[in-house]
C-alpha cells in the first residue's frame, strides 16, 4: 500500500483524455473518490481503518483502470512505460 497522491490520478486522467478520449468517462468513473484529499500520513491512517471489502473494491477499481490502458496502444511519442 502506497500513497499515490492526487497528482498521479490527475496525470492519468489527463493522459487518458488526451491519448484515449474514448476511455475518459470510464476511467474518470473508476477513479471517482479514489484520489487522496489529505496529506499522506492522514490518508494512510484513515485508509487502514476502512473495512477490508472497501479497500478491495478501491484496489479493484484501480486495477480496472490499468486494465483499460493495457489494452490500448501508447499515444504517439509515448513509451510503453509512460503509458502504463
Image (tube, helix red, strand yellow):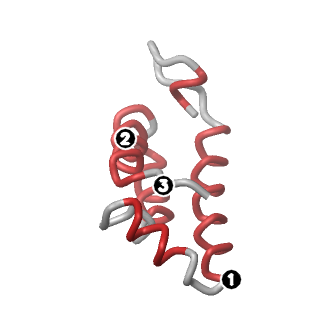
Task: Say if 68 sits above or below 19 in the image.
Answer: below
User: Residue 75, position in %: x, y?
Assistant: 48, 23
Mark closest to the chain's N terminus, 2 or 1: 2
Residue hosting label 1? 53
The residue under the point 68% across, 73% down is: 56
Mark closest to the chain's N terminus, 2 or 3: 3
- Residue 32 falls in image quadrant: bottom left
Q: Secondary structure at mark 1?
A: helix
The residue under the point 35% across, 54% down is: 6
Q: Residues within 10 Å of mark 1 (few under 14, many from 20)?
A: few
Residue hosting label 3? 3
Task: Give the alpha-carbon distance from disc 3 to disc 1, as whole Å.
Answer: 19 Å
Query: Which residue of the protein is positioned furthest toward the top in this rendering?
Result: 77
Q: In the shown orientation, is residue 71 left or right of residue 28?
A: right
Q: Nearer the viewer, mark 2 or mark 1?
A: 1
User: Residue 33, position in %: x, y?
Assistant: 40, 71
Which mark identifies residue 11? 2
Amino acid at each position: 500500500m502506497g500513497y499515490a497522491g492526487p497528482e498521479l490520478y490527475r496525470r492519468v486522467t489527463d493522459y487518458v483524455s488526451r491519448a484515449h478520449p474514448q476511455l475518459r468517462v470510464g476511467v474518470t468513473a473508476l477513479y471517482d473518490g479514489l484520489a487522496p484529499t489529505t496529506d499522506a500520513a492522514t490518508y494512510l491512517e484513515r485508509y487502514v481503518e476502512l473495512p477490508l471489502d472497501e479497500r478491495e473494491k478501491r484496489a479493484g477499481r484501480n486495477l480496472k483502470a490499468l486494465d483499460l490502458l493495457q489494452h490500448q496502444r501508447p499515444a504517439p511519442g509515448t513509451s510503453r512505460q509512460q503509458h502504463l
